[in-house]
Image (cartoon, coloured by chain):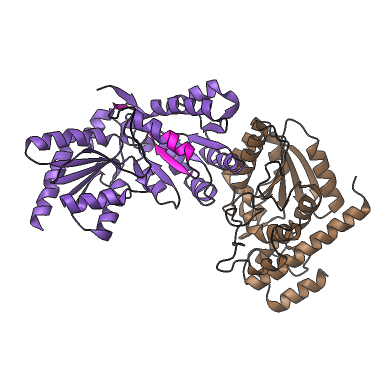
Chain colours: A purple, B brown
Amino acid sequence: MKKVATREAYGEALLELGRENPDVVVLDADLAKSTKTFDFGKHFPERFFDMGIAEQNMIGTAAGLAAAGKIPFCSSFAIFATGRAFEQVRNSVAYPHLNVKIAASHAGVTVGEDGGSHQSVEDIALMRVLPGMTVFVPADAVETRAAVRAAAGMNGPVYIRLGRPGVPVLHEQSLDFKPGRAIKLRDGGDAAIFATGIMVSMALEAAEILTGEGIGVRVLDMHTIKPLDEAAVLQAAKETGAIVTAEEHSIIGGLGGAVAETVCASHPVPVYRVGLSDVFGESGKPAELLERFGLTPARLVTAVQEVLKQKAAL
Amino acid sequence: MATQEEITRLEEKARQLRRHIIRMTGAAGSGHPGGSLSAADIVAALYFHFLCLDPARPDWPDRDRFVLSKGHAAPVLYAALAERGYFPVDELLTLRRLGSRLQGHPDMKHLPGVEMSTGSLGQGLAAANGMALAGRLDGRDYRVYALLGDGEIQEGMIWEAAMAAAHYKLDHVTAFLDHNGFQIDGPTRQVMSPEPVADKWRAFGWDVQVIDGHDMAAILQAVEKARAVTGRPQMIVAETVKGKGCSFMENQVGWHGVAPKPDEVERALAELA
C-alpha cells in the first residue's frame, strides 16, 4: 500500500486552500521544512509568517489575525504547539473561541531518534480538555486533506494532529469525511477497536488476524476525538460488549479516555486502552519504538483477546 | 497641537473614568483599582481623542483597535467603553457579578468593544501584532494600540512579541507602558526589575518616547509623534503613579487588587469631584 506522511498531505492541502481563500494565512516557528508549511510560504510569501523559535508568540499573533478576520494555520511540532504554548492556546484562542487552526506535526513516538523530549504523547489530552476546541487526528493523507479543509470551513479553534513518518493511504479520494462522525472500516460483532491516527491501519491488520481465529472485530476510524462520535461508541458498546482503543498517545486523557468516559456514563462494558502507559518516549527508529511501546497489530490482537476474556467473565 | 480646550475636555474625561473605576470596584467589592487609575489618562486620550470607532458597529473592519494587555485594568476599559456608548453606563455597576458581561478580566466574546480577551499577562501585544498584520494584508489603515503593565513585561512572551513587531516593521502598532513601578508583591524594581525599560524597547528595535503619563498634553503629543513614525513599532513609556487621583491609594502597593470600602469610595469620589 502506498505510504504518505500526514504532514506531507497537510502541506499540499494548505497550498490548495491558499489558492482558494485569500484569508488563509500560515504561521510557523522555525520548522517550516519539517511541518511542510514551507511550500505555502514559497507560493504566498505575504501570507506566511515565520515567527522564529517563539511558539507562544506564534499562537498569540494568530489570535490577533483571527480577531481581524483571517484564518490562521499555526504549525510546529505537537509538543511545542500544544505544550509550550498551552496557556496561549487556552486563553488567547480557546477562551475567546477565535478562528485559529493549530496543525502540529511530529506527534507521538514516531518522531523517532529525537527522543522523549520531542515526542508528544499528551497533546490530544491537552487540546481535548479545552471547551470549544475541535480535535482531528487523521489516519492518512486523504483524511488529512479532508480534515484541513473542514477546519478551514468551520468557525472556531481546531487542533489537527499530524505525524512524521509515511503511513498507508487507507481511504479513497471520494471519502465522506464529516467532523465528529466515526468511519466504520470493518464490521464485526465480538469486539470493536476504536483507533486513531497511525493506529487505524494497524487495527485493520489486527482485525484480519482475529477473523482468522473466528473473532469478528469492528474497526472504527476515529479521525475526530472531539466532538467524539458518542453514538458510534455506544452502539459498539451495546452490540459488541467489548472495546479496545488504540492511539499513539498516552492512555490517559486521549481517545481511550474519551471512549471510556462515554461508555462508563451510559453503557459500561470492558474498555482496553492501547497506547503509552503513563510513560515518556525515547530515542530509536520509529518502527523500533512502536514495537517497544506496544503500538503494533500483534499487541492489538492480544488486547482484543484480553477484553474478550473480561467480557466473558462478566 | 490640541487646543487647551480639548486638553481640558480630556482631563475631565479622565476624571470621569476614575470616578467610574472607584464606583465599579467599590460596588464589586473586588478588582484592581490601582493599575486602572494609573492608566486613566492614557485610556481617556485614546478613546476620546484618537481611536476611530463606531460603537454602533463594533465589528467595523476599519476601526482602530485597543488591546488592554494588562487585562486586570478592565475597569478603566469598561468605563471608557460605556462612556463611548458601547453599553449603558449603569451596567458598569455589574462588574464581576454572576451573569455580567463585565467579567473580572475583559471577555471579547461577550462585551462589544473589547478587542481581545486578556488577563493572563503577556499575551495582548502578540494579538495586537496579529491585528496589525491582518490590517496590512487587507490594505486597511487602522492603527492598533496596546497598553502594557510594567510588571507584565516580566513575561517572556512580551519580548517575543516585541521582537516580532520590529521584525515585521509593524509601524501601525503603538504600545504604552504603564510604568507605575508596582506589582502585587511590591515595587517592580525589588520583585524583578524590568529596568531600564526604555533602553530595552529601543534595543528591540522600537521607537521609544518617555513621557509623564498623567500630563494630557504630553500624551497627545507623544501619540501624534508615534503616528508619524514609519517602519518601526512605537513604545510610549508613560511614567505614572499607581492609584493616581486618590491620595490614599497613590503609590500604595496594597491597592493593586483591593476594592475601596463604602467610606473610601466617598473619600475618593470627593477628591475626584
Relative image position of residue B39 (x, y in whole percent): 73, 56
Work out whether A168 lies above or below B132: above
Quadrant of image for the N terminus of chain A = top left
Q: Residue at the location (79% across, 47% down)?
A: B50
Q: Seen in the image, is A120 located left or right of residue A74?
A: left
Q: Where, by quadrant of the figure, is residue B16 drawn?
A: bottom right
Q: Residue at the location (30% across, 46% down)?
A: A255
- Residue sitting farthest toward the left: A213
State yes or no: residue B157 in magenta.
no
Relative image position of residue B9 (x, y in whole percent): 87, 57
Which region of the structure is painted magenta? A148-169
State yes or no: residue A156 in magenta.
yes
Work out whether A141 lies above or below A309: above
Work out whether A313 lies above or below A140: below
Relative image position of residue B18 (x, y in whole percent): 76, 64
Relative image position of residue B53 (x, y in whole percent): 74, 48
Q: Where, by quadrant of the figure, is residue A192 drawn?
A: top left
Please name whichever residue, A232 or B101, is drawn nearer the observer in this view of the structure. Answer: A232
Residue A87 visible to an observer of this rendering: yes
Please name whichever residue, B156 or A272, is drawn nearer the observer in this view of the structure. Answer: A272
Residue A296 visible to an observer of this rendering: no
Report how many numbered discs are placed on residues in the image: 0
Q: Seen in the image, is A208 located left or right of residue A66?
A: left
Q: Seen in the image, is A196 located left or right of residue A128?
A: left
Q: Where, by quadrant of the figure, is residue A60 drawn?
A: top right
Quadrant of image for the C terminus of chain A = bottom left
Q: Residue at the location (39% across, 43% down)?
A: A135
- Residue sitting farthest toward the bottom: B263
Please name whichever residue, B33 or B247, is drawn nearer the observer in this view of the structure. Answer: B33
